[in-house]
Amino acid sequence: MKKILLFALLACLLYACGNKTKQTGEQDTVKNKDEAKQLFDRVIAVHDEVMTYERMIMENKMKLDSLSKLDIKPAEKDSAMLLSKNLTIAENAMGDWMHKFEPDYSGKPNDEAIKYLTAQETQIKHVDSLTKAAIKASWQFYSKYNK
């Protein structure tokens, strides 16, 4: 009888430990899903911000292209053309990122999704920096002639 009781107690203990591990694993999975969702939301927030600059890029390119057709010093024409080219590079970087971005990460394991979204966050932040720098430089250059 003592052996049966000891065996039953041991079985209950093992079941409880196994159940605890399962619960901990489920909690980790929920935590990882939350982390992936937060990463996704941050990536989309940066994307949305960069998209608001699309109009500025187009307007600044037109202004710079107009400037390069005026009778100004060749070095300034070259600068205007280079700045316009930088705006185009920023615009293309955004387009390239959007074409390569895979928003449906649900089929990937959580750790893989987190790794993917972390890399995407880094990439879109680079596109954001590139875009802002190109716009700022073009404004500074154009403002010399827009007085």
Image (cartoon, helix red, strand yellow):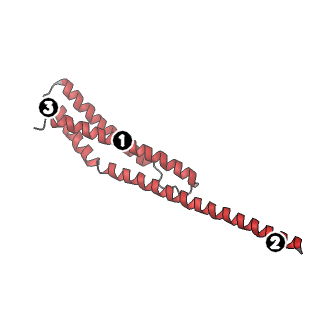
Image side of residue 43 versus residue 33, left or right: left
Q: Amino acid at mark 1?
A: Asn
- Which residue does the numbered mark 1 point to in the structure image? 92
- Disc 2 to disc 1: CB gap under 8 Å: no
Secondary structure at numbered mark 1: helix
- Disc 1 to disc 3: CB gap under 8 Å: no
In this view, the residue farthest toward the top is 74
The quadrant where residue 22 appears: bottom right
Q: CA distance from mark 2 to mark 1?
A: 68 Å
The relative height of residue 79 versus residue 97 in the rendered view (above or below) is: above
Give the label, 2 or 1, closer to the camera: 2
Is residue 59 among what the camera can see?
Answer: yes
- Please tell me which of labels 1 and 3 falls first in the chain: 3
Spot occupied by residue 2 in the image (x, y as percentages of width and height): 88, 73
Q: Amino acid at mark 3?
A: Leu
- Dot 2 crowding, Cα within 10 Å, few <14, some 14–19, many 20+: few
- Please tell me which of labels 2 and 3 falls first in the chain: 2
- Please tell me which of labels 2 and 1 falls first in the chain: 2
Secondary structure at numbered mark 3: loop
Q: Residue at x 25, y 48 (%)?
A: 55
Image side of residue 75 versus residue 7, left or right: left
Spot occupied by residue 41 in the image (x, y as percentages of width and height): 42, 56
- Disc 2 to disc 3: CB gap under 8 Å: no
- Which residue does the numbered mark 3 point to in the structure image? 70
Screen quadrant of the C terminus: top left
- Which residue does the numbered mark 2 point to in the structure image? 8
Screen quadrant of the N terminus: bottom right
Secondary structure at numbered mark 2: helix
Q: CA distance from mark 1 to mark 3?
A: 27 Å
Spot occupied by residue 62 in the image (x, y as percentages of width and height): 21, 40
Image side of residue 74 versus residue 22, left or right: left
Is residue 87 among what the camera can see?
Answer: no
